[in-house]
Image (tube, rainbow, N blue to C red):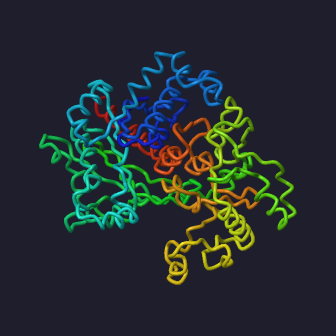
Amino acid sequence: MKNFKIIDLFAGPGGLGEGFSGYSKNGVNPFKIAVSIEKDAFAHKTLTLRSFFRQFKDAPIEYYQYLQNKISREELLNLYPDEAQAAYDEAWLAELGSPEFPHETVVEKIKACLTAEEECILIGGPPCQAYSLAGRSAMNKKENFEDDPRHTLYREYLKIIAEFKPAVFVMENVKGILSSKLDGEFIFDKILEDLRIPQKANSKKNETYTIFSLVTNKMPEDLNKRDFIIKAEDYGIPQARHRVILLGIRNDIDSVPSPLRKVEEQVSVKDAIGDLPKLRSGLSKLEDSYCNWAEEIRKFNHKADVYPNLSRGAEFIAEKANPCFYKEWFYDSKLMGVVNHETRGHMSSDLHRYYYIATYASKERVSPRLDKLPLELLPQHKNVKQAIKSKSLFSDRFKVQMDFKPATTITSHISKDGHYFIHYDPMQCRSLTVREAARLQTFPDNYKFEGPRTAQYHQVGNAVPPLLAKQIAEIVYKLLDAECNRVTKIKK
């Protein structure tokens, strides 16, 4: 079995890389991350820890002691200096496209992680704020919207293709990229043109590429823009996450990829997080008191007694979880608890809304919009009445993640407040924890997110679901394996 090295750009906390490195064939992992590059310090810290974890066939007991807060990160890494150094060599804290990290420096770093004869694969995607509908709405107010560097960060990705000639590249972005314009022209058309002939990036002689869809058998010349959209819930991800993902194949490779296989039944929120320990919310900017709101809930629902004395959780709680779907991916018997499972604080007025909205949703099987709330529960915002009247996007600014279907898209906005991510269980009366969001994003339970809670939420929201990436990795492996067999037969 041939092995392939991965170059992971704009890596975030490592969702794409986790999927590729976690794919195995006959017990062997054909993909190994050579280098992952990320500019955010907390995401880089997460990347480094996960790289350290992958240095071992079986992670040492001290790794779990760190997750359980029994030893410090420094103590863990000092115990295994060789593996720690390998992790720091792999995960690089750098901002692509910035003056501090010119292209030549990036190239030298990647070359140091590869050998000349190794075939490589490029994965990743440029930051998506400039392409998202909300991001563009805010940026349109700026005079320099057209000059925003986030529009052209894909050129850094393009330069790496031109330089290293990967056999395959996987590029991910938000749906908004399909309608985004730069200088009056659709930027997606320009991106496709550049990716097909990447030597335009640095004027060097280079291979050309064919861009395939991962969801249809259509030939590349017959594809339309929407054929590049992957609806994650159709492929076993417990989340309605719709993203543009391109599969580029070097034109000396004669094999053609098969599309992703849809699941017969979608995975629900309850399937994904229902086994995690039940928690209560806290109060923000006030003295935290369980009784303040829990006693009021008891007045309305006698079933509140089924969850007595709930805690707010912690960075690690010693209560085992037992995932009911894809257990071999999520579950780790050595973990002995749950990581990153701590509730945030909420205003007491929001807790009343959460309880009412979650109860309404459990009975009506739909998350209510603002016009379904009693007047006394409406938020005190000046635009509330207008949002209700116009039925705008913000009229559903409080959203329950329904237990019987996939979640709505987990985005980085979850780091700001939990209003769009209310737990379906009224008795818990809270928004989702980092671990619950990570489950919906399909990160394994032993994947620890570093940094303060806000940074953890941000990392999870920006990631590619690893289980989706694993399915893409399988397609890529089968493609390259078929090509290797074809070339071997020709040589014989």
Rendered image quadrant of residue 291? bottom right
Number of callouts:
0
Q: Where 76 falls versus 311 (above or below)?
A: above
* Quarter placement of the N terminus: top left
Say whether residue 283 is visible.
Answer: yes
Q: Position of residue 104 (x, y in %)?
A: 20, 33
Left or right, 254 with reference to 65: left
Q: Position of residue 6 (x, y in %)?
A: 38, 35
* Quarter placement of the C terminus: top left
Q: Residue at x 35, y 38 (%)?
A: 121
Q: Position of residue 58 (x, y in %)?
A: 59, 23
Left or right, 144 with reference to 36: left
Front in this rendered view, residue 84 or 467: 84
Rendered image quadrant of residue 305? bottom right
Front in this rendered view, residue 143 or 168: 143
Q: Residue at x 22, y 39 (%)?
A: 99
Left or right, 140 with reference to 422: left
Q: Position of residue 447 (x, y in %)?
A: 57, 37
Rendered image quadrant of residue 444? top right
Say whether residue 485 is visible.
Answer: no
Q: Where 312 falls versus 113 (above or below)?
A: below
Front in this rendered view, residue 414 or 176: 414
Front in this rendered view, residue 315 or 233: 315
Left or right, 353 with reference to 183: right
Q: Where 159 falls versus 190 (above or below)?
A: above
